[in-house]
Amino acid sequence: MKEEELVTALIADHLRHLKLMSGLEKMGFDALDYYLGLPEVIFKIMNIESETVFLYYITAAELMCEKKEAVKVAAETLYEDLVRMREEIH
């Protein structure tokens, strides 16, 4: 599996997980108990160590979940953004 396929799949899983966590919070559960740490894994695979890029990713992912964007399209968009930012850093 290539980096793009792997990371896009992980981002899609992260977006689905964010939606699940949001639902749990609305029901009164502490969603942090169910945090998987997928963004950290994504950034390790992509070899990105920028806190600025990390904060961008977290914010963008949360906004995409609120907008009810299609998960696959949102994941591909986020991956492309991360690749572009990684190239700018290196």
Image (cartoon, grey):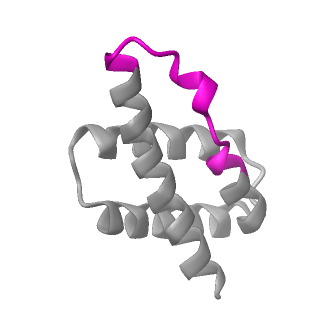
Which residue occupies 44% across, 40% down?
Answer: 18
Using residue 52 as the reference point, say whether residue 66 is left or right of it.
left
Which residue occupies 66% across, 59% down?
Answer: 42
Using residue 43 as the reference point, say whether residue 25 is left or right of it.
left
* Quadrant in which residue 84 is drawn: bottom right
On screen, residue 8 above or below 50? below
In the picture, the quarter occupied by the C terminus is bottom right
On screen, residue 79 above or below 37? below
* Quadrant in which residue 22 is drawn: top left
- Report x, y in % for residue 63: 33, 39
Q: Is residue 84 visible?
A: no
On screen, residue 34 above or below 73? above
Using residue 43 as the reference point, say whether residue 27 is left or right of it.
left
Along the line of sight, the residue nearer the viewer: 71 or 36: 36
Q: Residue furthest bottom?
A: 1
Q: Is residue 76 visible?
A: yes
- Report x, y in % for residue 35: 61, 34
Which span is picked out in magenta? Answer: 25-40
Which residue occupies 78% across, 50% down?
Answer: 49
Using residue 52 as the reference point, say whether residue 5 is left or right of it.
left
- Say if the magenta span includes residue 32: yes
User: How many numbered tags mark residues here?
Assistant: 0
- Report x, y in % for residue 85: 59, 61
In the picture, the quarter occupied by the N terminus is bottom right
Q: Residue furthest left?
A: 68
Which residue occupies 23% across, 54% down?
Answer: 69
